[in-house]
Image: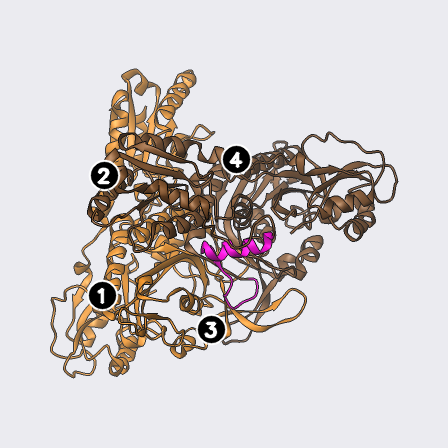
Chain colours: A brown, B orange
Amino acid sequence: MVIKMAKKKKDAPITGITVSKEEDFSAWYTEIINKAELADIRYNIKGFVCYRPWATITIKKMYQKYEELLEKNEHLPLVMPSLIPESNFLLESDHVEGFAPEVFWVTEGGTSGPLSEKLALRPTSETALYKMYHYWIRSYNDLPFKRYQSCQVWRYEGKMTRPFFRAREFHWIEAHDVFATLEEAKQQVVQDMEMTYQMLQDEFCIPIIFFQRPEWDKFPGAIHTYAADALMGSGKVLQLPSTHLLGQNFSKPFDVKFVDTDGKEKYGHITCYGPAISRIYGAMIAYLGDDKGLILPFDLAPIKIVIVPILVKGKEDIVKKKCKEVHDKIKDLYKVKLDDLEGSPGSKFYTWEMKGVPIRIEIGPKDIEKGQVVVVKRNDGQKSFVKEGELLEFIEQIANNYTKEIKEEKLLDFEEQIDLCYEKDSAKEAIENGKIVCCGFCSIDKDGEPCAERVEKEVGGLVRGKRVDEEKHEFSSCIICGKPAKCTAYIARSY
Amino acid sequence: MVIKMAKKKKDAPITGITVSKEEDFSAWYTEIINKAELADIRYNIKGFVCYRPWATITIKKMYQKYEELLEKNEHLPLVMPSLIPESNFLLESDHVEGFAPEVFWVTEGGTSGPLSEKLALRPTSETALYKMYHYWIRSYNDLPFKRYQSCQVWRYEGKMTRPFFRAREFHWIEAHDVFATLEEAKQQVVQDMEMTYQMLQDEFCIPIIFFQRPEWDKFPGAIHTYAADALMGSGKVLQLPSTHLLGQNFSKPFDVKFVDTDGKEKYGHITCYGPAISRIYGAMIAYLGDDKGLILPFDLAPIKIVIVPILVKGKEDIVKKKCKEVHDKIKDLYKVKLDDLEGSPGSKFYTWEMKGVPIRIEIGPKDIEKGQVVVVKRNDGQKSFVKEGELLEFIEQIANNYTKEIKEEKLLDFEEQIDLCYEKDSAKEAIENGKIVCCGFCSIDKDGEPCAERVEKEVGGLVRGKRVDEEKHEFSSCIICGKPAKCTAYIARSY
């Protein structure tokens, strides 16, 4: 019976999503958001969505993993107010200029009319936190001072929004660290990038490259910005966590000083790091999912195992009893669901594949006769007949290897997606084919900006910056102006 | 050496806080907030405070316990936008009227001027959620529909604010449940109250009584409100979680309907429950703390054990080595800190008592000679000399009983704080003595409001409502108007 079902399914696969991810990524993404019940875009404010339970449970697990890692690396949690007085913003001029177009303003309280000062819904917390760091940091004994908060931020985005990828309210972690020296601050930036690889690649199975962003694309107020790009199925890159070397650009206006070992007062050197968990979640479902629906790393799946009874007339009771028995054997070890509601096995397979449950167990009368159960893995569809006595061991093996398997399959070699280009025309073609362009570029300092503007218009992509890891390729001249290339840069379309 | 120290300390106790909790609760609370580094009130928006790491870690643990319990009771988590369009508010007239004086309004976005519609910073999420429940609930199969979110809310409070107790931004959980029948909704209210007892009394050691609030003091839009009151050291009660029977008051305007088993469309019956975690935290530190500082339930302490080396000249190395050895033995079992920084043992005792670390281990040269360590419990100061080989077992025993001990000591019998009063004058005197008054009252329906206003003016307390649990006392007439008493009511001063 089971085998027959499986065959039938193979002949005429029931796939969850009506458009292919490869053919129309955008439509595919919209369908998976709806059909796996991850978010609802019908909330009546533009750019604001509701996160439904299936997404919320996974996002909570992602937060937990990230927070554990930050705490292991000596960060302590805190909670800041979500409103920031306008006067705080005005203290750092690049920052206020950069964020001004994106801020939601609270101007009224209750029925008593306008507030005495406009309050920003934080778009990021530098200007709230560093006001307090001024009080909390006194001497070298307080350094390094490493804090993080898990919270949401608001940005009045002009660009098109899309659930999780880009929204006017999103959920992130921000870590803000203060050091006695610039050298230590630079080391923190390296640690931030290491944490990003540990989380995004090892835990969430999303391959990334870190770029030092060009001068014109850095965080408002930073000395340098380092940001990870991930490549989505659409051939566009998505910016994932970024870390910023702020140096003393904020510690001076916000008066974040410490008395050093030599008895002198000095300004701290600051870094900030902002993994946007909700956006990483979006990237993960987009990157790992297939035409049947979600694929999730084992630890992040809200339910790890679903048991589907295969009912045959006259033998319902024996099957139900066995399913319950297996369920009870598993339930203290893994989050398991026995799907004993109405509905055909096929429609249940469809539902739980869509939701990305890693393991499905099917049990029918013939399996019971043979003392076995059927185990199907979501990531590769592999089907096994397992002796009941060996089931727990078999599940444990899957649990231990599942995420690794996804990673090995999915961590495509970025290099393969990169085309080396020596001319503007070939770069344009590569971009149109969904590739990332690697080329010579005059400069990612301020003086390179005119060429970057031409890249956007004439090549159709954005200059993402230069790689932070080892750069193997060298070019003699800028792909745009032909002047000597000061660096090797990467160009891609982007969300 | 250890014994000498302890004696010295007993003769001239170093207490952390300069005012006694009993004599001036308010000043004591302010000091503990500052000295234990729980919150900072210097943030430059009135009524908004920063939660520092020591408080944040405990609050996170409280959230985790509450969320686990809600999920055990079939609630699923979700995340809603924090902004609510003004038009949503206008749908339920009592609700909009009740919350209008308390709403912060977002009116501008970026540099493009006023938004087309004012957006409220949610003061509570009924009017956001039920807009979506309209889409998510279709048939009896979807019921009961139980969801919660952990989030912050904003209220433009007129009353005086105080860190954690009452602020213009606070952190809570809100659970919103929909049922097919009013009877089931009423059962949920009972479950909400049970969860409150499980959390507040059993886990957080705060004794409470549930009252059905009078008509004039219920949640705007509710049929009935049931709220827990806890008694603070000041003799004032603090409202802790409340649960509201909304019935169909919101499902009708928000069109939350389901097709019932009989094929007919019906409106759902809704309940909502709102434990304010940050406020409960405030109540907990206020209720359990003493003049040395914090006392925390074992599970909620950020650090469970601190090890303090007792250094004697010439024997520093052997003591340090032993402390490290003991630390390493404990560290995989409990969150432990070896305080090996500069400073006298006395000042370290002072610091960690202030922070409420449950167990202190002291190790000096004489202890090492005797093969023992000194163990001191924060809650009762009990000091023990423990053979090194028996230390882990000894700690385990403390860990298992610590919270229970606090509870047994601190769960004062509410009844003792309650004075039965038959006349207005004795009620006034009882309130002035920090007691709760139990008396006859004409009515907690609308018609009792004039008497309640006189209670506030002439007795100096508020009518908190009638007990939800069994009422043992009966009165023949209202303490104010002398008319026949329809119920036994409680009067108290309140935050």
Circles 1 and 2: CB atoms closer than 8 Å = no
The amino acid type found where label 1 is placed reads: Ile
State the residue position of label 4: A407
Q: CA distance from mark 1 to mark 4?
A: 63 Å
**Residue identifier under label 1:** B436
Residue B187 placement: quadrant: bottom left
The amino acid beneath tag 2 is Asn
Residue, disc 2: B401
- Among the two numbered marks 1 and 3 on one chain, the one whose residue lies closer to the N terminus: 3
For the residues beneath circles 2 and 4, the answer to whether they share a chain is no
| Residue B442 rendering spot, x and y as whole percentages | 19, 80
**Residue B369 covered by magenta stretch:** no
Q: Is residue A31 magenta?
A: yes
Location of the N terminus of chain B by quadrant is: top left
* Residue at disc 2, secondary structure: helix
Output the chain of dot 3: B
Q: Are marks 1 and 4 on the same chain?
A: no
Q: Residues within 10 Å of mark 3 (few under 14, many from 20)?
A: some
Question: Going by the image, does B149 lie left or right of A447?
Answer: left
The residue singled out by tag 3 in the image is: B88
Q: Residue at x 25, y 69 (%)?
A: B181
Residues marked 1 and 2, same chain: yes
Q: Secondary structure at mark 3?
A: helix
Task: Pick the residue in front: A399 or A306.
Answer: A306
Q: Which residues are magenta?
A: A24-47
The Cα atoms of the two marked residues, 3 and 4, are separated by 44 Å
Compared across the picture, whether A413 is left or right of A171 comes to right
Q: Amino acid at mark 4?
A: Lys
Question: Callout 4: helix, strand or loop?
Answer: helix
